Amino acid sequence: MLSFEEFQDYCREHILDALPEWYGDAKVAINEVTKNNGRVLTALTVLPEGENVTPNIYLDGFYMEYQHGSDLDDIMEEMADVYLGGMQPAEEVGDIAKNFKDVDFVRDRIIMVVVNREKNADMLQNVPHTNREDLALIYKVLISREDAGTATITIQNDHLPFWNMTKEEVHELAMKNTRELLPVTVQSMNDVMREIFSKDGMDEEMMEVLFDDRPADEQMFVISNTSKVNGAASMFYEDVLSDLAEKMGTNLYILPSSIHESIAVSAKMGNPEHLAQMVAEINEGQVTPEEQLSDHVYLFNAEEKTLTLADTSTQELGLSAAENREFYETAQTNTEGSRPRHHR
């Protein structure tokens, strides 16, 4: 059996054989790509002459297929299909270089994504970001959005002078644009399960038996966005959490289930230490390393309208303190139609 290094060499030498003949003069390279939480993946790239954009073909997953007995020729064909599919992007992607230089195009497409501060410390040195407790909001330009997924480019510190923007301006635009381009969704866990079982063909009568409607303060609510990708950033909209806290009549504990979504429960549904232990166990056993957000739990104080660590503190974690009040005032200013609500 080939080692991973030998597998990389084989893919580099044979990928052009699996592609149409007009790719014969393309440049083939192997690169390391750092993903979220510092996870490093190995990518193969095929760059045809005259092109400046090419998809990454991540070899780690294909090597696992090989280890489990898949034929090398079948793997190369699958790899070629992935590459050719990636080389047929939306019209916006085809003009990435031009659009990314257009400040008007960029201003309307800056969005925010939340990541773990400690696990992404190296990356955060090179990108504008806003620290929030043990997390950090980073910013991306949404190039295109289709049913199959979204295409984004992470904003680097070097981009800001070119656009004549400050980090604060980028943050304000991201707070506004993310809400418009990727609207927030809040669903009870019952409703989420109803959707899943309904798609699987379960009849309504059976679902009524399985998913009884309990009071809001006894339910779990999933907070994400309409695309269900990088939706955990939605927990930083004060009015969304305020509405949910008012519905429950209590403060909230926010459980970061992944970078894609968070779960809100009434603060009376447990203590933060036990909830944090549950989050850590789920992360370890059920969430891929690059999709993990945090092992900690947050408290949303409905009266003060702030989100803070509940089971620990930034000081205990050795992180700089977050200025939550300033953040929520900014968030509220950039939320159209929002109004302050008071805890009952």
Image (cartoon, grey):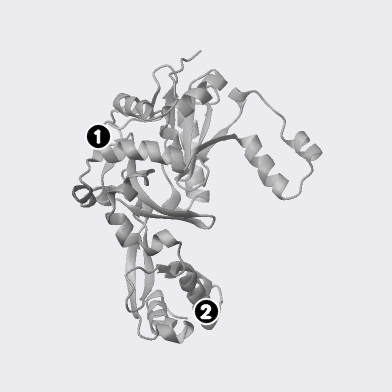
Q: Which one is nearer the viewer's eye here, 32 or 186? A: 186
State how far apart marks 1 and 2 are (Cα): 49 Å
Q: Is residue 124 above or below residue 204?
A: below
Identify which residue is drawn at 35% across, 50% down. Answer: 141
Three-letter code for the amino acid on which mark 2 is drawn: Glu
- SS at mark 1 in the image: loop
Q: Residues within 10 Å of mark 1 (few under 14, many from 20)?
A: some
Residue 218, x across and y down, in percent: 61, 25
Three-letter code for the amino acid on which mark 1 is drawn: Ser
Disc 2 designates what residue? 77
Q: Which one is nearer the viewer's eye here, 177 or 119? A: 177
Identify which residue is drawn at 39% across, 84% down. Answer: 13
Q: Which one is nearer the viewer's eye here, 20 or 306? A: 20
Residue 92, x across and y down, in percent: 41, 59
Q: Please identify the quarter of the rendering in which residue 108 is found.
A: top left
Residue 7, x across and y down, in percent: 42, 78
Q: Is residue 198 above or below residue 8?
A: above
- SS at mark 2 in the image: helix
**Does any portion of residue 94 appear in the rendered image?**
yes
Q: Earlier in the sequence, mark 1 or mark 2?
A: 2
- Residue 59 — which label? none
Disc 1 designates what residue? 320
Q: Residues within 10 Å of mark 2 (few under 14, many from 20)?
A: some
Residue that extends furthest to the top in the rendered view of this protein? 344
Q: Is residue 242 above or below residue 132?
A: above
Identify which residue is drawn at 49% across, 33% down. Answer: 275
Q: Is residue 224 above or below residue 150?
A: above
